[in-house]
Amino acid sequence: MAAKYVYFFGEGKAEGRGDMKNLLGGKGANLADMTSIGLPVPPGFTLTTEVCTEFYKNNREYPAALKGQVEEALGQMERLMNKKFGDAQNPLLVSVRSGARASMPGMMDTVLNLGLNDDTIQGVIAQSGDKRFAYDSYRRFIQMYSNVVMGMKGELLEDILEDMKEEKGVHEDTELSAEDLKKLVTLFKDKVKETLGRDFPSDPHEQLWGAIGAVFGSWMNQRAITYRRLNNIPAEWGTAVNVQSMVFGNMGNDCATGVAFTRNPSTGEKVFYGEFLVNAQGEDVVAGIRTPQPINKGQGDGSLPSMEEVMPESYAQLMKIQQTLEKHYKDMQDIEFTIEKGKLYMLQTRNGKRTAHAAVKIAVDMEKEGLIDEQTAVLRVEPSQLDQLLHPSLDPKAPRTVIAKGLPASPGAVNGEVVFSADDAEDAARIGLKVILVRIETSPEDIHGMHAAQGILTARGGMTSHAAVVARGMGKCCVAGCGDIKVDYTKQEFTTRNGQLIKKGDVITLDGSTGEVMLGAVPTVSPELTGDFALLMKWVDKFRRLRVRTNADTPQDSKVAREFGAEGIGLCRTEHMFFDAERIMAVREMILAEDVDGRRKALAKILPMQKGDFKGIFREMKGLPVTIRLLDPPLHEFLPHKDEEIAEIAKVMGVTASVLKAKVESLHEFNPMLGHRGCRLGITYPEIYDMQVQAIMEAACELVKEEGFEIVPEIMIPLVGLVKELEIMRENAVRVADEVIERYGVSVTYLIGTMIELPRAALTADEVATQADFFSFGTNDLTQTTFGLSRDDSGKFLPFYIEKDILPNDPFVTIDQSGVGELVRMGCEKGRKTRPDIKLGICGEHGGDPQSVTFCHDIGLDYVSCSPYRVPVARLAAAHAALKQGK
């Protein structure tokens, strides 16, 4: 028995159901649903997504049974409508629309008024008694079909239409007469033949199969591919095709068409919201050919009459229907309707797209109204949407001039004067100036300028480049990898691809949520994280199992993260503390010292500063765990490279500049990521780690003694690949920690663990666990070392890998589950086998990515750690993971 490929709906009965979205697509399932609950839906049928899948699998050939099933469904439609497809006296006209299971507004193709030709047009004129309407529908059909199905550029026919309006001295299409439109039909068909070398098809059945093929074909058009990639919609899902009896909104002034939302999609306010046009077809509203009118009196500027005033009876019916739909679907609906000769028809309903602010408000309001429960409310808000709420955003009403676009590396919207060095940013901030730091790429040395700047713009680097990672940690807006700009440090300027010159002191605006760079200061609006948002997050915390910590290096970052609900610090990077202007000199002295005594002398200057940092962080995180990573980067990152800086340090150290320069050059590494860094530094220069452990434990002991804090410091040894490395480092750390505790005479519990960021550490995690109280998976470096990719350089080619489906996502943004993820899973299993109570978490940037958080939940990690401003995102993602797993 042949598979069923076609599902009919009409006259209150439907073969499909609302829960068949995977097979019928969202539109087809909802049309079946609306028909079944008694709403006025023009009859039609749906070709399933399986047809699309087979179409592409079999070299664009349809399943053998399809044609017969389509003809049978067409016959049912003819009987219900009492019209015949292709009949000259009493023709049935149809629309052909796409309908994927995930909503993809505007991405795929639609054809209206299908079935018209020089014979059937006479039947339409006879049926309607309106020659003008008939030829208006015919010319629209030729315009749409020639573009969508035949591949002709739309502007070729649009130009002919505009020329005729100019010739007739009219502004609107509606002002053209029946004879004008009849002439247009002839001109359009002539232009099609001239351009494409073939006649416009007159056989309605040929037209129908052409349109069906075009809709299936549009699943693989570039805009649909791009939309799917951006929204993580798999290509194998395919689209359905909906063939539906035409109803006409362009038959006169008692006809209309419109699009509406059951609630305001921008604010979430519970008001019916939308637009309509009298004497028009649906595409007119969407395409903006005419200025649409508001649905009700409360909207618009009052210059155009609303549907509530113009068509009060249809408006009252639509109000009842929209309330029915919202109660039925228990979600805000986006609806399309047509009014033909005063009769209302529903053409579509779907869950409406909405802003983050609206998503939160609608979810909370619907729970209060009793439409949904708390669990459903939590699932209604997408974790990735929350970024919009957690940072300032551009005022949507403000005009903007976009001059370049890069990667949206860290959300928020800021404006300021352009500066090109970290020192200039810091100097400007001291006198109260707002600045944007523009760099080719940033390095750890720029940290003070990044901190001082409002936002960061880099020409190079990816979503997990130094600039992106640090900016997210600071909650700073950042646009990275902006290949549209060329930075010239010497001239203190950058130029855009289109030739715009921006000099130091010029004002620009960055939108870290879109990656756009704009000229001048575009006004921003601040987030509000109280009320509905706070209530939603309270519900979120009821349902999640996974704990959420933060990556924070300063008391301020810690404070922000705690306000966002962080349950501790999963990564405090001590090297960021070394770049402070007051201590960088001592750090450089330590690195360049000739012997252990020289290093210890310099480290003694840094010790009280580090201790002060840790005390500040411990205070903000009172009672919560704090994981502190000991020094990780190679030493050369802290050194000067300019002659004047080298001379300045040489003077302090009492050596010649040439001697010092030779020392700096000796520390140069060819591949620092794989060189003398992490625990390898601790092995060769144990006094560095000893100082840091001492600072951590003294800070903890003093707070326990002076303020009665309960603190459990977690000391993390980075870049371990061999258990022997960790054994040596642990022994040293325990010695120093216990000495400090004994000296202070207090009781402090501490943990010593490691960051798993090398494949070897994951593969031998059972051995490593013998020396570790906890594992924190550093998935940034684990991704680099697993793939053999530099995260700062891979931005040049990774977009092509994603575009060509070599990789589904950027592995530095979303964890590569089958490779890197398997190493994490293996590390967990082996670690727990040796030490069942071992604490497991991740602290790479993946800790704030919703897909990666779900993976971490699934493999049983105890916590994720992420940038302060992504803590609510991770909390919500963790709740989603728990709720979906429970279903």
Image (tube, rainbow, N blue to C red):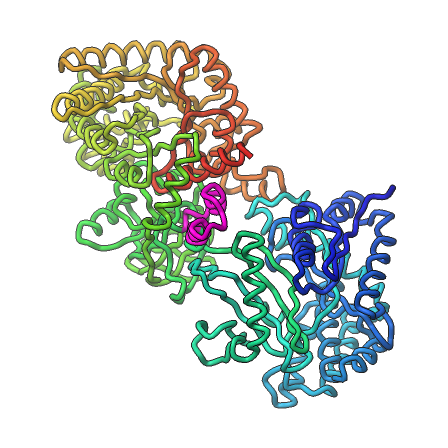
The quadrant where residue 82 appears: bottom right
The image shows residue 104 at horizontal and vertical percentages of 60, 54
Q: Measured along the vertical axis of the image, is residue 276 above or below residue 267?
A: below
Magenta-colored span = 360-388
**Residue, far left:** 706
Query: Is 195 or 863 nearer to us in this picture?
Result: 863
| Residue 148 placement, left or right of 676 | right
The quadrant where residue 633 appears: top left
| Residue 660 placement, left or right of 886 | left
Query: Is 235 or 735 nearer to us in this picture?
Result: 235
Count of marks, rendered view: 0
Query: Is 449 or 67 nearer to us in this picture?
Result: 67
Q: Is residue 378 magenta?
A: yes
Tell me if residue 480 can be seen. yes
Tell me if residue 670 can be seen. no
The image shows residue 560 at horizontal and vertical percentages of 28, 41
